[in-house]
């Protein structure tokens, strides 16, 4: 009897180092879950140390519970259905009902305990990207821990040593699991909430999928040729705007878990990169920018003083502001397709000639698409089609936005005299210099051979 009890005790303590047995399933924190891609207005922390919460684009922050001074979170890795934009849903993998997973927010100096339950069809692990943790909490399958098997729960526990912008993602079958959308933001707020304080703080992850038009599940072996370039697994116009009030100090935090770099470009006010996944950039080391390149596996936090207007913010790689239908389309500029279209239409009645004068027509084109597919470019503004999809959104700054209000304020009303307009005068043909006639000297120079000097 005694021996039996001791056996169990010993067993429990060995397993307890990694698996959840020590805490017991009954004491697992509740795993909150969400079924929509609607942005959650940031809730103030009900307990733990005070902080100013961030806004996750088309996302939310994971609730926690305090247990004996430890902040406990429960992540559930699982297949999810994510709306990429109205009209298209994708079968992804993520956490707690969504992909990316919920943002984890905590404060420098806090001890966190993260329970991770694996409901995927294969093993996983979680790496806390950029966080200083004990080696055994680093989440690298095979190197620092055994994999979290299907149906198992692991516990990670560490003290948050410094504030900053971080991520979490698997270190197990990475290519598949990240191509399926397994990732999330991990924000560590400064111990002193007055430090690095801003009025509005936004965060999102750059991710990419290869989903064939008409299907819903990403191809997981794609290396570079992705066709859906997304922010938090959303494409424009499905991406939330960055709403702010004139004069607000605004921070945008971006992390890149795709397989290529993204030069993130913002129109309007200049910004400064104030943080990387290595920490805060000292004031003396900052410089003004309008584009910051976010390399693979990097985080960038940048800040600016908001100026009224509708300011585009997008990846500057133009094909990253196109959706799936925009990839692999042949160039037809300058090709007279009238004759061709007639001939093809006899074989394919729905055939439409496209792209003869550039691709702009396609922004407004109503053509039949396969089910569950987005047009190559979408999004309409007050002046018509924007001709963009993918990694694009709008920083919407207004004079009258109330603190804590993140609702889309609609299109900007430009003050009189500040709007580009059409020139209605006479267009005169510019004078051009006549082309010079070739003279005898030029011809002589061009003579191929037989010309010998005297
Ligand atoms: Cu890009």
Image (cartoon, rainbow, N blue to C red):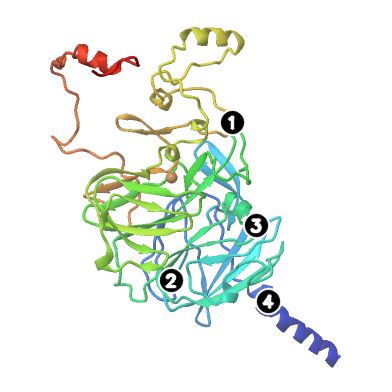
Q: Is any part of residue 102 visible from this angle?
A: no
Of the residues tagged 2 and 3, which is closer to the observer?
3
* Residue contact at pointers 2 and 3, CB within 8 angstroms: no
Q: CA distance from mark 4 to mark 1?
A: 45 Å
- The residue indicated by pointer 1 is 371
In-image side of 172 versus 379 (left or right) = right
**Ligand 1 closer than 8 Å to label 3 CB:** no
Numbered tag placed on residue 46 in the rendering = 2
Q: Is any part of residue 366 visible from this angle?
A: yes
Where is residue 358 drawn, in percent x and y? 39, 23
Mark 4 or mark 2: name the one nearer the start of the chain: 4
* Residue contact at pointers 1 and 3, CB within 8 angstroms: no
Of the residues tagged 1 and 3, which is closer to the observer?
3
- The residue indicated by pointer 4 is 24
Mark 2 or mark 3: name the one nearer the start of the chain: 2
Mark 1 or mark 3: name the one nearer the start of the chain: 3
Where is residue 403 drawn, in percent x and y? 29, 58
Q: CA distance from mark 4 to mark 2?
A: 25 Å
* Residue contact at pointers 2 and 1, CB within 8 angstroms: no
In-image side of 451 versus 354 (left or right) = left
Q: Toward which corner of the image does residue 441 lie, by quadrant?
A: top left
Residue sitting at 50 percent across and 63 percent down?
Answer: 62
Q: Secondary structure at mark 2?
A: loop
Q: CA distance from mark 4 to mark 3?
A: 28 Å
Of the residues tagged 4 and 3, which is closer to the observer?
3
């Amino acid at each position: 009897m005694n021996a039996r009890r001791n056996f169990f005790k010993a067993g429990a303590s060995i397993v307890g180092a990694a698996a959840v047995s020590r805490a017991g399933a009954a004491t697992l924190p509740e795993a909150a879950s969400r079924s929509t891609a609607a942005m959650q207005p940031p809730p103030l922390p009900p307990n733990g140390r005070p902080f100013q919460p961030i806004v996750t684009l088309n996302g939310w922050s994971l609730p926690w519970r305090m247990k004996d001074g430890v902040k406990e979170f429960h992540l559930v890795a699982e297949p999810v259905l994510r709306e990429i934009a109205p009209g298209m849903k994708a079968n992804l993998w993520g956490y707690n009902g969504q992909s990316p997973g919920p943002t984890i927010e905590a404060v420098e100096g806090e001890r966190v305990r993260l329970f991770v339950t694996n409901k995927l069809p294969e093993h996983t692990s979680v790496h806390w990207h950029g966080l200083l943790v004990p080696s055994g909490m680093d989440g690298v399958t095979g190197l620092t821990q055994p994999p979290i098997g299907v149906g198992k729960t692991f516990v990670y526990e560490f003290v948050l040593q410094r504030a900053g912008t971080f991520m979490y993602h698997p270190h197990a079958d990475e290519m598949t699991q990240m191509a399926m959308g397994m990732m999330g933001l991990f924000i560590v707020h400064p111990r002193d909430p007055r430090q690095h304080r801003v009025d509005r703080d936004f965060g999102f992850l750059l991710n990419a999928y290869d989903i064939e038009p008409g299907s819903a599940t990403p191809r997981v072996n794609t290396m570079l040729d992705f066709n859906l370039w997304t922010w938090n697994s959303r494409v424009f116009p499905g991406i939330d705007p960055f709403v702010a009030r004139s004069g607000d100090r605004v921070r945008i935090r971006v992390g890149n878990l795709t397989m290529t770099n993204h030069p993130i470009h913002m129109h309007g006010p200049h910004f400064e990169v104030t943080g990387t996944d290595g920490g805060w950039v000292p004031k003396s080391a900052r410089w003004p920018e309008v584009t910051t390149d976010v390399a693979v596996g990097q985080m960038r936090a940048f800040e600016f003083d908001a100026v009224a207007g509708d300011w585009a913010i997008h990846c500057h790689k133009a094909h990253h502001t196109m959706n799936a239908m925009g990839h692999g389309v042949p160039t037809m500029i300058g090709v007279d397709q009238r004759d061709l279209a007639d001939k093809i239409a006899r074989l394919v009645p729905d055939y439409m000639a496209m792209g003869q004068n550039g691709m702009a027509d396609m922004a407004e084109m109503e053509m039949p698409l396969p089910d569950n597919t987005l047009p190559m470019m979408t999004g309409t503004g007050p002046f018509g089609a924007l001709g963009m999809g993918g990694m694009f959104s709008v920083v919407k700054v207004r004079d009258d936005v109330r603190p804590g209000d993140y609702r889309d304020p609609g299109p900007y009303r430009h003050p009189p005299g500040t709007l580009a307009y059409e020139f209605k005068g006479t267009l005169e043909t510019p004078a051009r210099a006549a082309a010079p006639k070739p003279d005898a000297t030029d011809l002589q120079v061009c003579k191929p051979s037989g010309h010998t000097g005297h």
